[in-house]
């Protein structure tokens, strides 16, 4: 559930603010987030596992805006990061480094050092060479690094191949069969302390069975390790819970948690960590865009809008479907349109074959744009990146200003005369 609803005036609002007002005030394209929705989604996870020791580590990559991170930090959220940049953002947003888990296959020595200085909760290590490097960096600093191994449980997440990460062929994690050996190595290295086990099998999952299969495999591994005197204190099940973009019916966080908890009855002290990104942020944001032109050809009707693939690349990159709805619906006959942007590529579309009744100048909301939206934006075609707004009740806060044209080449140089 989210707080983007049509109100009695027939218009789409974000919480207590009409979206037309925001578009007029701040221009388009414009990302608009709802604080109440972010909080609601975060609490859904938190309450689902209320009695069991747990930590929600929001996956920063889904939406790393300082305003978004700050809203979650105030709830006491932890964070799942994948770069030094994300780590600094969490700190700048007021997040607690002791609640940070660091994922990713390519951590640099400098990133490890900074994370150790700040005292993060855990490194989610993905390979043996990474273990060796972490051991060395920690040794040079005279500290002990807390580690979890990301296990690749080889289960099919039944999602888009680009966002499926738990299969044998993926670059992610440590193969299930090799895991005991790698744990032994981690246990033996002097500047590491084994604290956890993690996995992340993919994103936008709409069924529970892959999560359950992965968890069962990891619990079996925890038993094997226990027999060898290696104790696992936390189990990090990653992110990946899907959301409704169209007609998907993903499980609620409460259903997801319930089935996990049914597996953990013998592990009352095993802390459960979640790394949700999309499930918290996607439906907490919309992207507003205006119709510039309606172009009718013999074969197709195009609605040319002022947002493009540089603003929202998911449709182009994954053929992802996101709802496009009018902010002020008009009466009349709906016409089938492809919604395309001004970028010079055929792949520049936001949605295809959508029936709407439109006129030039109409304001549209692209739904479910709070996750993997702005964070994947670029300046392609020398387009400035959109502004971002956080709505909080009747208030609207600018959480990122629209870029200025001169910023596009601010870091560039002409050759000397
Ligand atoms: N943890 C790890 C280690 C991850 O790699 C990811 C996402 C997450 C957590 C969060 O997953 P979520 O709860 O958001 O599904 N750009 C793609 C999604 C890429 C996801 C990458 N990893 C998209 O727009 O669909």
Image (cartoon, rainbow, N blue to C red):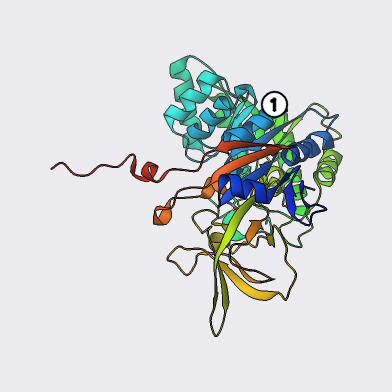
Percent from the top left, x then y, of residue 383? 43, 52
Q: Is residue 201 above or below residue 292?
A: above
Viewport quadrant of the C terminus? top left
Residue at the extreme bottom: 298
Image quadrant where residue 359 sits: bottom right
Q: Which residue is drawn at 45% across and 24% down?
A: 136
Is residue 149 visible in the rendered image? The answer is no
- Number of marks drawn: 1
Residue at horizontal 34 percent and vertical 44 percent from the top: 409
The residue to which callout 1 is attached is 74
Q: Is residue 145 left or right of residue 284?
A: left
Q: Is residue 315 left or right of residue 136?
A: right
Q: Where is residue 61 in the image (x, y as percent from the top left)?
A: 57, 41
Q: Looking at the image, which residue sits at the far left?
A: 417
Is 217 situated left or right of 80 in this image? right
Residue positioned most to the top: 142
Q: Is residue 251 visible?
A: yes
What residue do we see at 85% from left, 33% from top? Answer: 266
Is disc 1 placed on a helix, strand or loop? Answer: helix
Crowd class of label 1 (few under 14; some 14 to 19; many from 20; radius 10 Å):
few
Q: Where is residue 324 in the image (x, y as percent from the top left)?
A: 66, 61
Mark 1 CB within 8 Å of ligand 1:
no
**Quadrant in the rendering for residue 205:** bottom right
Q: Which of 206 and 135 is in front in this view?
A: 206
Residue at 47% in and 39% down: 106
- Foreground: 263 or 385? 385
Tell me residue 242's x, y (percent): 72, 52
């Amino acid at each position: 559930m989210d707080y983007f609803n049509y109100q009695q005036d027939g218009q789409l609002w974000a919480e207590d603010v009409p979206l037309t007002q925001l578009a007029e005030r701040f221009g388009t394209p414009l990302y608009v987030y709802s604080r109440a929705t972010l909080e609601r989604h975060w609490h859904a996870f938190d309450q689902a596992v209320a009695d069991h020791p747990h930590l929600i580590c929001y996956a920063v990559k889904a939406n790393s805006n300082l305003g978004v991170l700050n809203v979650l930090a105030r709830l006491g959220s932890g964070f799942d990061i994948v770069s030094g940049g994300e780590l600094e953002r969490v700190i700048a947003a007021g997040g607690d480094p002791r609640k940070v888990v660091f994922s990713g296959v390519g951590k640099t020595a400098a990133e490890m050092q900074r994370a150790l200085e700040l005292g993060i909760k855990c490194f989610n290590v993905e390979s043996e060479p990474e273990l060796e490097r972490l051991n060395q960096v920690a040794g040079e600093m005279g500290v002990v690094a807390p580690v979890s191994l990301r296990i690749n449980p080889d289960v099919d997440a039944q999602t888009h191949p680009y966002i499926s990460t738990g299969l044998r062929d993926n670059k992610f994690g440590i193969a299930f069969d090799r895991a005991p050996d790698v744990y032994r190595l981690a246990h033996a290295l002097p500047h590491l302390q084994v604290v956890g086990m993690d996995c992340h099998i993919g994103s936008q999952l709409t069924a529970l069975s892959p999560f359950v299969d992965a968890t069962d495999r990891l619990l079996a591994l925890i038993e094997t390790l226990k027999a060898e005197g290696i104790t696992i204190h936390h189990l990090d099940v990653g992110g990946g819970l899907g959301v409704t973009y169209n007609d998907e019916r993903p499980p609620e966080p409460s259903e997801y948690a319930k089935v996990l908890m049914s597996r953990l009855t013998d592990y009352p002290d095993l802390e459960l960590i979640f790394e949700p990104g999309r499930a918290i942020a996607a439906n907490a944001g919309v992207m507003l865009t205006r119709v510039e032109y309606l172009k009718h050809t013999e074969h197709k009707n195009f609605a040319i809008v002022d947002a493009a693939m540089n603003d929202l690349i998911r449709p182009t990159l994954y053929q992802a479907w996101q709802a496009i709805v009018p902010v002020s619906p008009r009466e009349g006959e709906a016409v089938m349109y492809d919604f395309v942007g001004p970028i010079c590529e055929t792949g520049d579309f936001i949605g295809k074959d959508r029936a709407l009744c439109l006129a030039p100048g109409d304001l549209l909301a692209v739904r479910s744009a709070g996750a993997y939206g702005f964070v994947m934006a670029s300046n392609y075609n020398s387009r400035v990146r959109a502004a971002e707004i956080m709505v909080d009740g009747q208030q609207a806060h600018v959480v990122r200003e629209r870029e200025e044209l001169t910023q596009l080449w601010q870091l560039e140089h002409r050759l000397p005369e």
